[in-house]
Amino acid sequence: MIELQEVYKVYDGTTRALNGVSIKIEDGEFVFVVGPSGSGKSTLIKLLSAELKPTEGKVLVNGFDVSELRRRDIPYLRRTIGVVFQDFRLIDNKTVYENVAFVMRAVGTPTRIIKKRVPYVLELVGLKNKSRRLPHQLSGGEQQRVAIARALVNNPDVIIADEPTGNLDPSRSVELMMLLEKINKLGTTVLVVTHERELVNQLEKRVIAIERGSIISDRTGGYYLDEPVEE
């Protein structure tokens, strides 16, 4: 479960990125977070992954209190979260299989488990027959699927996708969202940060809209505000 309780985040003592945000996301939900550039979406992701701590309020993620989390405990929180970035962040000289296996080795997973888990996850994202390819031999959509497999392979409770369709054409964007929906149906909580209005409205999920650091809408049904809220 993810919960923010009256969270404020202020940079340099003057720039307020989040302004009393309260959100609760239950296990197994699929949620979009939308809003214009500078609205606070990136700050929200950094709080959930403990890259930042709130200035005020509580951030609770999968049983961890980010507000009070000690530095040595941050890796344990991050093992419960898989993050997918817009720019893929694949290792160029490693194959698809090696890119996905890398994050398992990084947390000390035994080789015998890696050999079972990686093929399963690659099959789940439709890339089992491309496990020996290098990233440059894949399309943009396929590279993003590798990024999702990598985020998923350690069996996290939550997948956070940060503008995952930003480098994809519309048809590939829809395919990617269908894949995330499939993963969600297997029990993983999915949080997608995006600004793509048509895609959000098409899927009709819960949508949390942020504007100037505040929640301006939180509802289910593919609702993406057409106009910004006035001051």
Image (cartoon, rainbow, N blue to C red):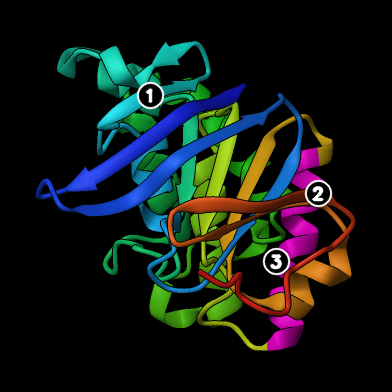
Q: Which residue is drawn at 70% across and 33% down?
A: 188
Helix, strand or loop at label 2? It is strand
Q: Residue shown at 30%/27% (left/top)?
A: 56
**x and y percentages locating residue 107 in the rendered image:** 32, 24
Q: Which of marks 1 and 2 is nearer the N terminus?
A: 1
**Circle 2 is placed at which residue position?**
219
Q: Mark 1 packing: few (<14 Cα in 10 Å), some, or many (20+)?
A: some
Q: In this view, does 157 lie to the left or right of 106?
A: right
Q: Is-magenta flag for residue 171?
A: yes
Q: Earlier in the sequence, mark 3 or mark 2?
A: 3
Give the main secondary structure of the magenta stretch.
Answer: helix
Side of 190 where 160 appears, left or right: left
Identify whether 158 is placed above or below 97: above
| Rendered image quadrant of residue 222 | bottom right
Name the amino acid, label 1.
Gly
Where disc 3 sits, the SS reads helix
Q: What stretch is highlighted in magenta?
A: 170-184
**Residue 172 x/y as whole percent:** 70, 79
Amino acid type, mark 3: Leu
- Point out the tag, 3 or 1, that comes first from the N-terminus: 1
Disc 3 target residue: 176
Q: Nearer the viewer, mark 3 or mark 2?
A: 2
Q: Which mark is residue 57?
A: 1
